[in-house]
Image: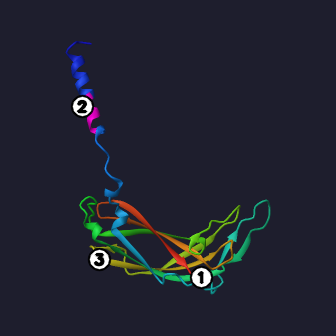
Amino acid sequence: MSSLFRPALVVFAALSVLPGCQSPTSPDSTTSYADAVTITAAPDPIIADSDTGGRTYRVVRGNNQPDEILPYRWHGVFATTLAMNSTANDSKLDIDWPVRVTATQLTMKQASAGIITPPTGSETERSEFVTLGATGNAMTNVGAGITLTFEMWYDLPSQRREAVAQVTFSFEDADGTAFSKSVNVAVAP
């Protein structure tokens, strides 16, 4: 290796390490896309009833045992309103309007006193939902909101009505930036 090449290599290596020596940004100073969305539910808490309309679910038994068809115990309807808040104006986020809702997912979780209490062993929470209606699928600016109404059916190992509805919304802005946000909505005992 030539004597002229060695010092150039050392200088290059030193310069390439310098950017890594900067102190990291404070976790408090980061803004996430999810911070730009406000989600509210009504009613909150959700009031569930036993009027399931005969809706059922299948339990696969295996080992040459016949599957079981069981009725859901509980049913509820609630609405969520989504709106982009003033955090959407943060230049770090670079949100391009409109922001569309691309998917929703709702799962029911067993709860006690509003605290999620996962089932034990092989017990499983069962639920399904439909979106009854939506006032739109895109938010066009800060403050512009949309409302989605959900109907849900569920059955819990505890056999109790009290639960938490976990709703996750997936979003995408006009330039394809995707993000999601979840909200937990209590179901009254």
- Considering only vertical position in the picture, is 89 above or below 55? above
- Please identify the quarter of the rendering in which residue 19 is found: top left
Mark 2: give few (<14), some (14-19) or many (20+) Cα within 10 Å. Answer: few
Q: Nearer the viewer, residue 115 or 157?
A: 115
The three-letter code of the residue at mark 3 reads Gly
90 inside magenta stretch: no
- Considering only vertical position in the picture, is 109 above or below 81? above
Using residue 85 as the reference point, say whether residue 147 is left or right of it.
right
Q: Position of residue 5 (x, y in %)?
A: 22, 17
Closer to the chain start, of discs 1 and 3, is 1
Instruction: Tell me how the rendering is colored.
Output: rainbow
Using residue 13 as the reference point, say whether residue 51 is left or right of it.
right
Quarter of the figure that contains the C terminus: bottom right
> Any mark on residue 105, and which?
none
- Asked whether the residues under the numbered discs 1 and 3 touch, taking CB atoms below 8 Å apart as contact, a structural biologist would say no
Closer to the chain start, of discs 3 and 2, is 2
Tell me the residue that label 3 is attached to: 143
Tell me the residue that label 1 is attached to: 75
Tell me the residue that label 2 is attached to: 15
Query: What stretch of residues is rendered in magenta?
Result: 14-19
Q: Position of residue 74 (x, y in %)?
A: 63, 81
Question: Which of the two marks, 3 or 2, is nearer to us in this view?
Answer: 2
- Please tell me which residue is depicted at 27% across the width and 32% down the height of the picture: 16
Mark 3: give few (<14), some (14-19) or many (20+) Cα within 10 Å. Answer: some
